[in-house]
Amino acid sequence: MTTEIANTVARFFKAVDDREWAMAEALMANPYHLDYSSFGAGEAADLAPTQILKGWKGFLPGFDHTHHQIGNLDISVDGDKAKVACYGTATHVIADAGGGTVWTVVGTYTITLKRVGDWKLTGTTFHFKYQDGNTGLPEKAAERAAAA
């Protein structure tokens, strides 16, 4: 069972990095609790997956590559609910960016899931630790995504 949960979480991050939006949405419950407040992204909110993915579609494709690496998964299961605590490193690359080509964000995630036939993610809370590299890349990525 924990392998199924770990694989669901891994598939989600891979879908986001591969821009497979339909796959990412299929792995998300509705509503979805999103909390990036520790990173200065506003208050936590319960949103439709389509709302979340619309925001990500307007930003992530502006990078040439993104790579979300998760590890040290600590999985707890209570019936049809599960919680995964894990490390996360998100690397973002724009190959032709002046001032550095890489922006990396490091923290931990608390990811909740529920079993609805298959396991679905019900929420993500990101606990920011630090960032490194060119912190101007997000703005450049948003500009590139809007121009595409």
Image (cartoon, rainbow, N blue to C red):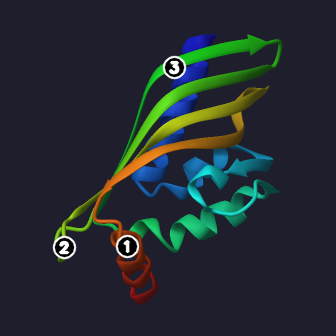
Type of amino acid at the residue the image marks with label 3: Leu
26 and 70: which is toward the camera? 70
- List the residue tagged with mark 2: 99
Task: Find numbered disc 2 in the image and state the secondary structure of the residue it sits on.
Answer: loop
| Residue at x 63%, y 62% (from the top left corner) | 41
Residue 104 visible? The answer is: no
Where is 130 relative to 147, above or below? above
Distance in Å between CA atoms under marks 3 and 1: 29 Å
Distance in Å between CA atoms under marks 1 and 2: 17 Å
Task: Find numbered disc 3 in the image and state the secondary structure of the residue it sits on.
Answer: strand
- List the residue tagged with mark 3: 73
Report whether 47 appears left or right of 13: right
Report whether 64 appears left or right of 60: left
Q: Position of residue 51 (x, y in %)?
A: 71, 66
Type of amino acid at the residue the image marks with label 1: Gly
Q: Which mark is residue 62?
A: 1
Q: Position of residue 89 (x, y in %)?
A: 39, 40
Report whether 16 appears left or right of 27: left
Displayed quadrant of residue 55: bottom right
Type of amino acid at the residue the image marks with label 2: Gly
N-term mark: 1 or 2: 1
| Residue at x 20%, y 65% (from the top left corner) | 101
